[in-house]
Image (cartoon, rainbow, N blue to C red):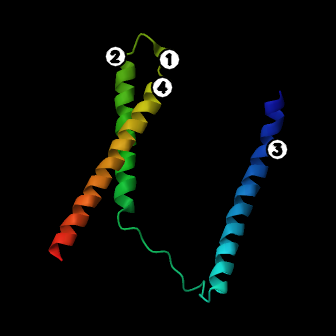
Amino acid sequence: MPGELLIPILVPLGLFAMIFGIVYIKNRERMAMIERGMDPRSYKPQPAPWQNLKWGLLLIGAGLGLFVAYLLDRTVFSTTRDENEAIYFGLIAVFGGFGLVLSYVIEKKELYNNRDKE
């Protein structure tokens, strides 16, 4: 009963707090730039060159982990149908981690190749 009453109150309050926090932090950032003599309108965030590779490999790893967990759940662990939630979370984390490690290896290899060319 108390949860049913609190959810309609806390969700809008949390949403408002999140939006207010984002606007407040952006405003403070702009004020700090003005205090340092910078023009906030001319500031553009710098692109991260390997960000797409990192996200792509993370999502591929998480999807592969979810697929492997599904296959294991339907074949190897088919006798215990209701107790296999942990395998999904575990394999998503493991394969997502493998994707991030692979991204790191590719970035490091490319960095050293570019350094040797110079």
Q: Earlier in the sequence, mark 3 or mark 4?
A: 3
Disc 3 packing (10 Å; few <14; some 14–19; many ≥20):
few
Give the vertical position of 94 relative to 48 (above or below): above
| Residue at the spot of label 4 | 86
Q: Secondary structure beneath disc 4?
A: helix
Q: Secondary structure beneath disc 1?
A: helix
Nearer the viewer's eye, disc 3 or disc 4?
4
The kind of residue on which mark 1 rests is Glu
Q: Earlier in the sequence, mark 2 or mark 1?
A: 2
The kind of residue on which mark 2 rests is Val
Q: Position of residue 39 (x, y in %)?
A: 60, 88
Give the vertical position of 76 relative to 37 (above or below): above
**Extreme-left residue of the structure:** 117
Q: Earlier in the sequence, mark 4 or mark 2?
A: 2
**Extreme-top residue of the structure:** 79
| Residue at the spot of label 2 | 76
Q: Residues at badges 1 and 3 in contact (C-beta under 8 Å)?
A: no
| Residue at the spot of label 3 | 9
Name the quarter where the C terminus is drawn: bottom left
From mark 3 to mark 4, how far is it between C-alphas? 31 Å
Question: What residue sits 36% from the left and 33% below the top?
Answer: 67
The kind of residue on which mark 3 rests is Ile
Q: Nearer the viewer, residue 87 or 35?
A: 35
Q: Specify whether 42 is left or right of 48.
A: right
Disc 1 packing (10 Å; few <14; some 14–19; many ≥20):
few
Disc 4 packing (10 Å; few <14; some 14–19; many ≥20):
few
From mark 2 to mark 1, how far is it between C-alphas? 13 Å
| Residue at the spot of label 1 | 83
Residue 20 image-quadrant placement: bottom right
From mark 3 to mark 2, how far is it between C-alphas? 44 Å
